[in-house]
Structure formats: structure tokens, C-alpha cells
């Protein structure tokens, strides 16, 4: 027994589980003037669906710094909110999280509200959107790093398997989240090995 105990103390420790800390998330109240008015629901968290806003972000906006950059990100988030709330008639921006070009993560619809981002499959789906139009432009490195951190944390927190993280296009006939996002965030994307990724001209 003593030998076993000594051996155990000398044996290398088992590899620690990959850490997935909660990333910094800006609360909804920091960008959205409209208060939540509905009742929380116990939304199941079975999968994550990734989108793009499809609103382009210009290089000029990406170069903004400090307060101007923050204001541009908030304006983009409010553009999403306006589209979803006042044009489509939903209660709030339909996504649970929005990530800007600086990698800042904004709470969209709280996780205790059913999302409105993947037709007929909102139940069980956490919605994550990246700001930009990735059928025409590439996401920034900061944006992708934040996406990976957020996905890792959500997956670990809610015990969501890797094959339950989808681009929107896998659940509906759509180009969302765009070729230039899809092929870099999702290693299992079917187009990965057949498409050469390069920045679109003019970017
Ligand atoms: Zn989408």
C-alpha cells in the first residue's frame, strides 16, 4: 500500500480539463435603451447557432478608437434591434450575443428569453451573431478570438457537444453566417477543404 501511495504521489497529474472561463460580456443595458418587458422562460440550451448581421462594417469604422469605436458598435447593435423589433415585429434583437469587430461581446436577448434567430428551431438554440457581412468581408482576428472564447464557455457551461454548434446555413437555406466566417470558425464546414480563403478585393 505504501508503495502504491508513493507511486501515486509521483505519477504525473491527469491533464486538467481545458479551461473555459466566462468572457467579459457587456450587459444589454449598456447599449439598449428599451427595457425587457416579457416574462423569463426556462429556455433549454441544446445547441449554438452562429450568424452574421449582414450589415457591412467598413474599414473606416474598424479604425475608430475609444469612445467613437464604442459608439459605432452600439449603433450596429441598435441597427439589429431596430430591424428585429420595429421591422420584423419581434420583441428584441433576436440573438443572445453579438460580437463586434473589436471582439467586444454584447448581451442581446438574455439567455432566459427564447431567441428569434433560427426559424422553427429557436427552442434550444443559443444565438450568437458577429457584426459584419461575411459573404463580402472577413471577420477580424479579435472577433474570431472572442467567438471561440464565447463558444468554449457556453459549451462547457451548458454541456453542449461540439457537433451542436452550427452555422445558420445548416438549419435553413441561407448563406448566413457567410463564407468568410464559416470557413474559419467551423473546422467541420463542408466547404472548408474546397474553398481558398482570401480577403475579398477592396478590403
Ligand atoms: Zn443567420
Image (cartoon, rainbow, N blue to C red):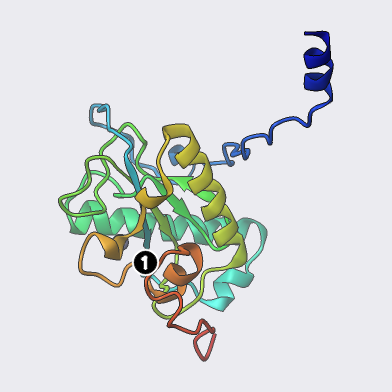
Q: Position of residue 182 (x, y in %)?
A: 42, 68
Seen in the picture, residue 169 relative to 158 is either above or below; the reply is below
Q: Position of residue 113 (x, y in %)?
A: 28, 35
Q: Position of residue 130 (x, y in %)?
A: 44, 60
Inspect this view and state whether residue 104 appears: no
Q: Residue at 39%, 76% (x, y): give it.
A: 191
Quarter of the image where the C terminus is located: bottom right
Location of mark 1 (residue): 177
Seen in the picture, residue 198 relative to 32 is either above or below; the reply is below
Q: Quadrant of residue 80?
A: bottom left
Inspect this view and state whether residue 36 appears: yes
Q: Quadrant of residue 143?
A: bottom right
- Foreground pick, 40 / 81: 40
Q: Residue at 32%, 39% (x, y): give it.
A: 46
Q: Residue at 42%, 64% (x, y): give it.
A: 188
Q: Residue at 63%, 38% (x, y): give it.
A: 19
Disc 1 within 8 angstroms of ligand 1 (CB): yes
Amino acid at each position: 500500500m505504501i508503495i502504491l501511495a508513493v507511486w501515486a504521489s509521483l505519477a504525473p497529474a491527469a491533464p486538467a480539463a481545458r479551461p473555459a472561463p466566462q468572457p467579459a460580456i457587456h450587459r444589454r443595458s449598456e447599449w439598449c435603451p428599451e427595457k425587457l418587458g416579457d416574462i423569463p422562460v426556462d429556455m433549454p440550451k441544446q445547441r449554438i447557432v452562429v450568424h452574421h448581421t449582414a450589415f457591412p462594417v467598413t474599414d473606416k469604422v474598424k479604425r475608430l478608437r475609444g469612445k467613437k469605436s464604442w459608439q459605432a458598435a452600439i449603433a450596429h447593435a441598435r441597427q439589429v434591434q431596430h430591424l428585429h423589433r420595429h421591422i420584423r415585429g419581434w420583441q428584441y434583437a433576436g440573438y443572445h450575443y453579438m460580437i463586434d469587430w473589436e471582439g467586444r461581446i454584447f448581451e442581446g436577448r438574455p439567455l432566459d428569453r427564447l431567441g428569434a434567430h433560427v426559424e422553427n428551431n429557436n427552442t434550444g438554440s443559443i444565438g450568437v451573431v458577429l457584426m459584419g457581412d461575411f459573404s463580402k468581408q472577413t471577420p477580424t482576428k479579435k472577433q474570431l478570438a472572442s467567438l471561440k472564447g464565447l463558444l468554449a464557455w457556453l459549451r462547457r457551461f451548458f454541456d453542449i457537444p461540439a457537433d451542436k454548434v452550427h452555422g445558420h446555413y445548416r438549419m435553413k437555406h441561407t448563406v448566413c453566417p457567410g463564407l468568410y466566417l464559416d470557413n474559419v470558425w467551423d473546422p467541420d464546414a463542408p466547404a472548408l477543404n474546397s474553398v481558398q480563403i482570401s480577403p475579398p478585393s477592396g478590403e
